Amino acid sequence: MAEEPAVTDRRPDPLFVHSLQRALMVLEAFDSTARNLSLSDLSRKTGLNKSAVQRFLFTWEALGYLEKDTDTKRYSLSPKVMSLSYHYLKDKRLVEIATPVLLEMRKRTGCASYLGILYEQDVMYLIRLPQRFILLESTLAGRRVPAFCGGRALLSCLPQNSARSLIEQSIRTQLTPFTITDSEANMRAVRQAAELGYAVSRQEQLIGEVSVSAPVLSSGGTLLAAVYISADNNEWDDSRIAAELAPVVLKAASDIGRQF
């Protein structure tokens, strides 16, 4: 029997290291739904055979990226994985510039403030400044949300065919009863965001939340990120958002982009 099953690969370049891809599959199997995994769990989740998974687990543990519970024999991520994200964020000029702007935005509005980038088919938050600590997830950088419902300010700056392609290729999961999953309805929302300069999303990711976002463009017009304000849906109707939150989020996006 083969030592490792074939892994579907879109990178035929001879420089591509397939064994490294398999090793990272094991590391990336640890997510919010699977924080502690056994050898069998990882074999099943990655599709790799147990012999290969065992060697990868031993190596990741030896390098300090995984921890093994001696009683349960289950593995989890170690604090060492945080060092990679720390160095990424520390050296990211966008984060350095945006942080004081977002702090001021939160101070002015009393609402949570975020910075997100378009990554694959998701929005990945690089900065998250919560207004009140209700959920752990609302405080953590690195969280990803689907761009089709959480990244319309970003999508509004793409060519329409690119935005449509990303939406249609996304797994449009109904996160709440209010999540817009229809591709045409999403495109209408993207076009509206392009016209207004900002996007509004009501309760599409979290019940009770309304999100207002605007794209951050460099002085040369390059799309860099989007800034977000997260507020109580019951307290903010469209007219109040247009009068009070939209100008703040637009100014914040402009202030950040102007420094590039």
Image (cartoon, rainbow, N blue to C red):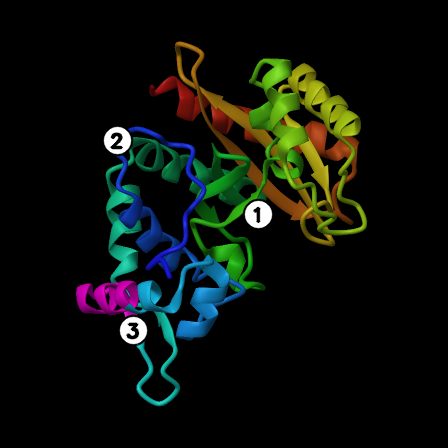
Q: Confirm whether residue 175 shows in the render.
A: yes
Labels 2 and 1: the sequence-earlier one = 2
Position of 118 relative to 49 (above/below): above
Report x, y in % for residue 184: 78, 25
Name which residue lies at 41% across and 59% down.
48
Question: Which residue is at the front of the view, 239 or 211?
Answer: 211
Position of 191 relative to 119 (above/below): above
Query: Considering the numbered disc 1 on the image, is that residue within a helix, a strand or a loop?
Result: loop
Q: Amino acid at mark 2?
A: Pro
Question: Which range of residues does the magenta coloring cover?
Answer: 55-67
Q: Amino acid at mark 3?
A: Glu
Q: Amino acid at mark 1?
A: Gly
Q: Quadrant of residue 152?
A: top right
According to the picture, the residue beneath numbered tag 2 turns out to be 14
According to the picture, the residue beneath numbered tag 3 turns out to be 67
Q: Quadrant of residue 192?
A: top right
Residue 130, labelled with which disc?
Answer: none
Question: Can you name the residue that lies furthest to the left here?
Answer: 63
Instruction: Tell me if mark 2 has few (under 14), some (14-19) or many (20+) residues whose alpha carbon lies within 10 angstroms of its own.
Output: few
Name which residue lies at 26% across and 66% down.
55
Name which residue lies at 51% across and 53% down.
130
Query: Considering the numbered disc 3 on the image, is that residue within a helix, a strand or a loop?
Result: strand
Question: Can you name the residue that lies furthest to the front here?
Answer: 1
Residue 110, labelled with which disc?
Answer: 1
